[in-house]
Amino acid sequence: MAINNWYKDKVFYQIWPRSFKDGNGDGMGDLYGVYEKLDYIKSLGCDGIWFSPLYPSPGVDCGYDISDYYNIAEEFGGMDAFRKVLDGAHERGMKVIMDLVVNHTSDQHEWFQKSRQRIDPYTDYYIWRPAKKNGKLPNNWDSLFEGKAWAWDEVRQEYYMHLFAIQQADLNMDNPLVREEVKNILRFWLDMGVDGFREDVITFISKKDGLPDDYIMPASKGFLYFNHGPHLHEYLEEFKRDVFSKYDCMILAEAPMVTPKKALEYITEDNNPVLDMMIQFSTQEADCLFTDFNHVPFNLRKLKRAFSKWQTKLEGKGWNMLYLENHDHPRMVSRYGSEKFRDESAKTLAVSYLFQKGTPFVYQGQEIGMSNWYPTDPEMYEDVQTRWQYFNVGTKKSPEKRLQRLWHGSRDSARTPVQWSNEENAGFSTGTPWFYVNENYKDVNVAAQEEDEKSVLNFYRKAIALRKNLSSVKNGNYKEYGKNSKSFYTYSREDENEKLLVVCSFVGKTKAWKAPRGFDLLNAELLLCNYAMSNRATLAPYECRVYCWKK
Ligand code: NOJ
């Protein structure tokens, strides 16, 4: 695991490779494009990169269905391009982490192809079950993407489990041979020099013994039986003992529905942690119920509760991973901010999390305030989960209503190509892009924001630089003020050197504001603000400020 916890000083940038930058003109983002942009990423102040999967894949789930764990897809430039990017990142002092997707493989993976034919040693690599009486499914669990969690295989004449798409077959992690395979994969990439992993839905790898029917959850049946299953800790311990403990690497685990209490079972620093950080989901739930598709109006108090819960409950025990966006959720400006106040709200969102305690992640395009995509035809969506939602859920509703549901909920909004300039295809590709470019690229793009000192992009640079220079951001205490406010999020950070006050407005009108008691604004330095002039008694729409008192 990470020696001296180096990840605590880093700011990571997440690359979703298909849509980052096309370097060879074939319309698909690739590692040539990443290489071109390494200095750009570094210029943000980011010194780590998380790559969403780069491995060969049929692309049913845009790379999260892996068919070969020991290679880099040709469409991304293959292994040579990857080595060049890895070296290029390291030369710039940047760490690189890979996505590790081992809850499932593609059904095109050689292991699955052999397993379905019962060829040893692969026979029990997956979760196979015979049909129950009258051809019934082995249990009532739901897939998170499409229908039930079981698919019939004609070759083997059995069902296999798939918690995600039908072509993503769940591995049988209870089989020691599968765990050996995982460890070999880890060693391969760590020996090549990668600096760690983001582990995809790793909390799903151990299913409840006997795979019982679920009569508790009304929707998403089975969730309680495959999330944090009985052997999860044991398997993570094994990966650490046999692999991670021998490398200087960082391990970040994706953990849907995790609570701070549960997270601490894995990340408590003085208790032989099996993971460095976990990706919680509660800060993604302030405008929806359970999934992004069940949209409800944005509730700032819910967001603040989630922020503060993680800040305070992990204090002194474990380390937070901080993020607002990734490839699995629509864009934050459109969700928690405002498209009308795109510029201001993108900045307030940045400040809302970048000054918290933990390691921040910035998702591609977030740094220029990219917003949601509003296609006019459901067929324009690419994502397997989104398509299932449109064609199979709430089908009695009008097509307009159903399309609007996707506008709110689809992760494809985060997957349109990064808008580099106002040139054709937003400067993403000289060919035909694999996916639609958001129409607002003429106004919202990197090139224009480079020229503008006050842009969202340059604001991110300032905020990240400040975070790196202020000791209180790394180690200071966190305290929230005005918890009941439906308009403002206010918190302080304090250590022996300084005290910071961070205030963010989440409303589109000017409102009266008073600093919390004990904060004397007359003696404070205003380090950062998204308006040229600020009035001490009010906050303008989506205004944010960071004040500092040196000791
Ligand atoms: C979580 C990933 O972030 C998501 O993109 C993917 O679809 C699922 N896991 C399945 O691998």
Image (tube, rainbow, N blue to C red):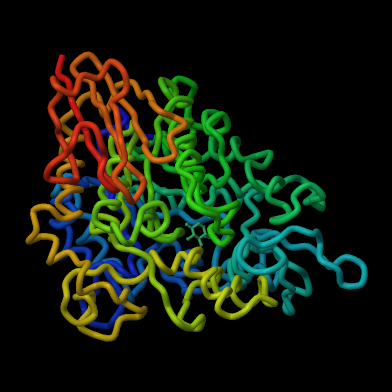
Splitting the image into 4 quarters, where does residue 294 fall? bottom right
Up-down relation of residue 111 to residue 525 (above or below)? below
**Which one is nearer the viewer's eye here, 79 or 522?**
522
Q: Quadrant of residue 463?
A: top left
Q: Quadrant of the C terminus?
A: top left
State left or right for residue 363 relative to residue 466: right
Inspect this view and state whether residue 317 appears. yes
Q: Nearer the viewer, residue 329 or 17?
A: 329
Res 45 → quadrant: top left
Q: Position of residue 420 (x, y in %)?
A: 19, 69
Q: Would residue 107 appear left or right of 529 to someone viewing this image?
A: right
The quarter of the picture where the N terminus appears is: top left
Q: Give the side of residue 95 with respect to residue 55, left or right.
A: left
Q: Residue furthest right?
A: 133
Image point 81% across, 62% down: which residue?
138
Q: Which residue lies at the image location 32% right of the left edge and 38% below the top edge?
A: 359
Q: Nearer the viewer, residue 396 or 81?
A: 396
